[in-house]
Amino acid sequence: MNSSTPLGVCLVGSGFLARTRARCYRALPGGGGRLVAVASRDEAKARAFAAEEGVPEVAADLDALLGREDVQLVDLCVPNHLHRPFAERAAAAGKAVACTKPLTAYVGQDLDEGATDADVSSVDRRRMAAVAIADARAMVEACEGAGVPLLYGENWVHAPAVRRAAALLEASGGRILDLRGWECHSGSHSLYSKLWRYTGGGSLIRLAAHPIGAMLHLKAAEGVARDGAPIVPVAVVADAADVTAGVEPGGPGVATGWVDVESWGSVSIAFSDGTRGLAMGSDTMVGGMQSRLVVLTDQTHLECNLSPHDSLRGYGAAQGAFGESYVMEKASHDAGWHSFIPDEDASSGHLDMCADFVAAAAGERPGRSTGALGYEVTRVVMAAYVSAAEGRRITLDEVTP
Ligand SMILES: NC(=O)c1ccc[n+]([C@@H]2O[C@H](COP(=O)([O-])OP(=O)(O)OC[C@H]3O[C@@H](n4cnc5c(N)ncnc54)[C@H](OP(=O)(O)O)[C@@H]3O)[C@@H](O)[C@H]2O)c1
């Protein structure tokens, strides 16, 4: 690639996340990332996506695009059961890989083809952990072996509020004693999210993975800054349940119909310096997505509000007062008071994350959030599922093959 040519990006998937990514790549200054192609399972959907998002090429299969020299970065926006195989194919073709969270999950990849949904979700949680963690390691090793970066798409790490908090923490030199973080909303739109065999769990892996990623990132940085070595997660205590199981389906509130995954999950993480992080994810919050991280040190107190934040509040006298205007992620109405987040792609970290993907794929600098973080998040999440099933504290070492 010539330094004046924008880096070529291939998106895989044409659903919710792919839309966010397309907006962000387009918004990068100087055409930092050029959307070259989109691959999605259903070519008609891929064509519609490409037309709306201004992507020149489409394919039903990623392999059809991997031979192209103008693709340098493959950005995986597909359900979790596809992350490892697609990452390995892209890496083998010499492409930099960006993989959304979670890096991997247990999705029945060690079962026979005829395994039912129930066969997948009833597998012993220790076996699930061993398979998913081994997959995460395999992804990291495949990219290392191919000499391409594996970028872990944890947007919280790139969010301006979290980055500023990280800089303030470094300046304070304080010890992070207590972290609390949560991502909650009224439930995913994606049909894949209802079934263990596609997502590898519910709100713990889909939502709590975000605060877990940010916590691990901040604790690692604290350790490196003070002692030259990261502070790492060592054990968890967790709980998980489908708390919406008794809710009448089809109502205007929270999503229902979770087949075999939890809609509420929490995990307490013990770090190697004895401090704690408490992360939760839940699909029980109407009124828009809430993404928060509180960081308490011996001397300081920081609160990151990724969403909602109140730089623009608006009141509608009735539904439709603002026409068809978008309010914020997962807010479906505009009547009453609302936070019309003016910069959602920026404040959520997605925009800076795409800039970071492009810079890392172009070899300008290492990525801020890489496969190493994705691997550690996988270990925490999978240990959390073991803990929730067995009702006791689980060390990460005992579930890591
Ligand atoms: N903040 C974040 O970081 C964030 C937010 C949301 C989601 N995610 C992650 O993004 C991933 C996708 O979630 P989503 O919400 O975007 O789901 P989604 O809206 O259901 O989109 C998934 C897309 O993948 C496509 N797909 C499925 N199988 C495929 C295959 N074999 N080859 C190519 N494309 C295939 C689907 O096509 P069809 O519709 O034709 O099946 C669809 O376009 C998940 O890993 C999720 O955890 C991350």
Image (spheres, rainbow, N blue to C red):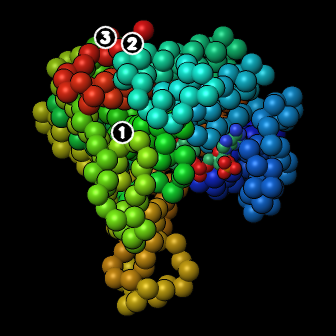
**SS of the residue under disc 1:** helix
Residue 366: mark in rendering:
none
Q: Position of residue 215 (x, y in %)?
A: 32, 33
Provide the residue designation for mark 1: 204
Circles 3 and 2, Cβ within 8 Å, touching? The answer is yes
Q: Residue at x 31, y 16 (%)?
A: 396
Report helix, strand or loop for mark 3: helix
Quadrant where the image shows the C terminus: top left
Residue 27: quarter of image: bottom right
Residue 385: give x, y in percent of width and height. Answer: 33, 29
Q: Which residue is mark 3?
A: 398
Q: Is residue 201 visible from the viewing direction of this image?
A: yes
Q: Earlier in the sequence, mark 1 or mark 2?
A: 1
Residue 386 lies left or right of residue 21; in this view the side is left
Residue 373 shows up from this direction? no
- Callout 1, which amino acid? Leu
Q: Which residue is mark 2?
A: 400
Image quarter for ligand 1: top right
Q: Earlier in the sequence, mark 3 or mark 1?
A: 1
**SS class, disc 2:** loop
Q: Amino acid at mark 3?
A: Glu
Gap between marks 1 and 2, in whole Å?
18 Å
Q: Is residue 211 shown above or below 329?
A: above
